[in-house]
Image (spheres, rainbow, N blue to C red):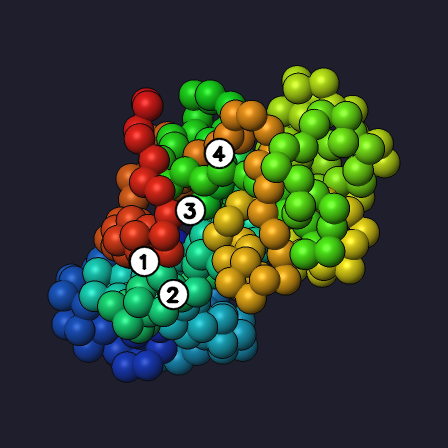
Amino acid sequence: MPALLDSRQILAFTTLARLGSFTAAAKELFLTQSAVSHAIKSLETDLGVQVFDRVGKKAHLTLAGERLLEHADRILREMQDARSGIEELQNWGQSRLRVGASTTACQYLLPGVLREFKQSFPECVIRVEPADSPEMGDSLRANEIDLALMLRPPARDDISFRPLFADSLEMYVAPTHPWTRKREITNEQRGSETFILYNKGTYTHHMVSDYLQGGGVTLRNPIEIGSMEAAKELVKIGLGVGVFARWVARKELAEGSLVARPIGSEPLRREWGFGHLRGRSLGLAEETFLGLFEAAIETLELEKAVDAA
């Protein structure tokens, strides 16, 4: 790879090209004339060409110098823009927020919080990456997102997890389903039904499968789907039994298009929170976002999680 140009030499070069005088260039740069002359000589030695013709006290660009000036001006502008952009980050709201969340959380949990956040940080660049909890750990490690709204992951040394709220998974059926009239549902009856579950490979899928199988229920040809909205629609038309949290089905419960039934004798609870790389300091925008989300938990009728860490 060719050696990079020295920024101080480039600055001396462009200043001399603009003023045409070593004395004037030295005065503008607060350098001695010999320092400017040395910078230009070093640049020419580095490039292997002469960039100025010295005519008396004047300096005129050579053809090589003219070609270099086209690039040098752009290089300096880019360097100035880079500094200005970094300095702007110190101003209120000049930041970015990169959040990972499941498609369900993006639809039901994030909109209100993001609206309030945008009011506080109108200039902040916000990016939300839809992904499931296992994938978000990889995105955090790859520095593709800063925060991940996720289920508590398996303990790892590189991910820090801040608990926020807990929920319970329930079974949901259509109002015409026979289970709506049963006081108790046996494991045999559960095993005879088609379950509509979130995609295999997600924490939720594993939790539901392990819970049911632990109770002696064998899943027979479950339907796997990546959208809770689609899952609810399949349940409504009687294609099977859905398993999701009450905050996902709040509207359907209110209108009577879905009926909730216990998934088993014991509740199946999940713990949600925000994950970020351990040791990574969170900025003002990220801490504000977390604070707004914590404040929204009561509004969303979610149960605050107890930090067991």
- What residue did someone put label 3 on? 146
Q: Is residue 24 above or below residue 247?
A: below
Position of 171 compared to 125: left or right? Answer: right
Report if the CB atoms under discs 4 and 3 are less than 8 Å apart.
Answer: no
| Secondary structure beneath label 2 | helix
For marks 1 and 3, the one nearer the N-term is 3
Q: Which amino acid does label 1 sit on?
A: Thr
**Residue at position x 78%, y 60% in the image:** 237
For marks 4 and 3, the one nearer the N-term is 3
Q: Is residue 1 above or below residue 210?
A: below
Indicate which disc residue 299 carries: 1
- What residue did someone put label 2 on? 112
> Mark 1 Cα within 10 Å, few/some/many (few <14, many 20+)?
few
Q: Quadrant of the N terminus?
A: top right
Which label lies toward us, 4 or 2? 4
- What residue did someone put label 4 on? 270
For marks 3 and 2, the one nearer the N-term is 2
> Mark 4 Cα within 10 Å, few/some/many (few <14, many 20+)?
some
Residue extending farthest to the right is 221
For residue 235, say whether it is visible.
Answer: no
- Using the image as rendered, state which of residue 206 and residue 208 is in the foreground: 208
Structural distance between the alpha carbons of marks 4 and 1: 19 Å
- Using the image as rendered, state which of residue 224 and residue 263 is in the foreground: 263
**Residue at position x 32%, y 23% in the image:** 308
**Residue at position x 51%, y 49% in the image:** 246
Q: In this view, does 97 lie above or below 182?
A: below
Structural distance between the alpha carbons of marks 4 and 2: 22 Å
Report if the CB atoms under discs 1 and 3 are less than 8 Å apart.
Answer: no
Report if the CB atoms under discs 4 and 2 are less than 8 Å apart.
Answer: no
Report if the CB atoms under discs 1 and 2 are less than 8 Å apart.
Answer: yes
Q: In which quarter of the image is the C terminus?
A: top left
For marks 4 and 2, the one nearer the N-term is 2
